[in-house]
Image (cartoon, coloured by chain):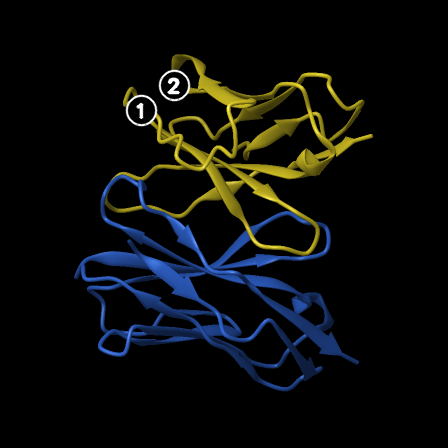
Amino acid sequence: GAGVSQSPSNKVTEKGKDVELRCDPISGHTALYWYRQSLGQGLEFLIYFQGNSAPDKSGLPSDRFSAERTGGSVSTLTIQRTQQEDSAVYLCASSLANGINYEQYFGPGTRLTVT
Amino acid sequence: AQTVTQSQPEMSVQEAETVTLSCTYDTSENNYYLFWYKQPPSRQMILVIRQEAYKQQNATENRFSVNFQKAAKSFSLKISDSQLGDTAMYFCAFTLDNYGQNFVFGPGTRLSVLP
């Protein structure tokens, strides 16, 4: 079946503009994660969605960052008034997280460049 | 809070040789899951192997195997007969059995396989 997809694959934006990044998880996966990864670095957790529960937003670095997940499926990460330090690869992952299967399946990421 | 440590930021190995990547974690819980992920330069994150904490037998996937030492909270990855395509960042990860809420990644080990 289809894996996790993300769009766009690359985004170049000017400082101060807003951007929206989209994630389509694997069908049936209730858990969805957003991560940020700077060049050559590890994964920085941003936000976690699980079913209809309130999301865990503890990793969002500032109030310029927000995310939503509509209908328990597609998710959008929005960065307002982008700054140069927001430049990174944004990864989305989904998981069944059902007490048996917890592995995350990752999308290819969106490379964001703020000029 | 759970933590994951990978003490080797970078490693290298000759093609066809064997290499072991280290991972330790910290938790007071008894039921959890461990994973190794691979991220090649193309950046797509791929699951390599998983281990359930309640299983004493070490997981194996072809040339990849783990040495899971629950008492020592250690979860190392052994790659046998290393291939050039194994060159990647390797991330150790941990989650409790709680719907994926506390999924933690280590900082990663950059592995280079040399011809």
- Which of the chains bears the disc numbered 2? A
Indicate the secondary structure of the residue bearing disc 2.
helix
- Which of the chains bears the disc numbered 1? A
Q: Residue at x 37, y 48 (%)?
A: B103
Q: Residue at x 38, y 27 (%)?
A: A28
Q: Amino acid at mark 2?
A: Gly
Q: Position of residue B79 (x, y in %)?
A: 54, 76
Please identify the residue farthest to the top as the structure is shown. A71
Q: Quadrant of residue A69?
A: top left
Q: Which chain is yellow?
A: A
Q: Position of residue B85 (x, y in %)?
A: 70, 66
Q: In the rendered image of this protein, does residue A24 appear above or below residue B16?
A: above
Q: Position of residue B71 (x, y in %)?
A: 22, 77
Q: Residue at x 58, y 50 (%)?
A: B45
Q: Badge 1 is on which residue?
A: A51
Q: Is residue A10 left or right of residue A72?
A: right
Q: Badge 2 is on which residue?
A: A72
Q: Amino acid at mark 1?
A: Gly
Looking at the image, which is closer to me, A44 or B31? A44
Colour assignment, chain B: blue
Q: Mark 1, residues whose alpha carbon is within 10 Å: few (<14), some, or many (≥20)?
A: some
Disc 2 to disc 1: CB gap under 8 Å: yes
Looking at the image, which is closer to me, A82 or B73? A82
Q: Is residue A104 left or right of residue B115?
A: left
Q: Is residue B22 left or right of residue B42?
A: left
Quadrant where the C terminus of chain A is found in the figure: top right
Q: Residue at x 72, y 50 (%)?
A: B42
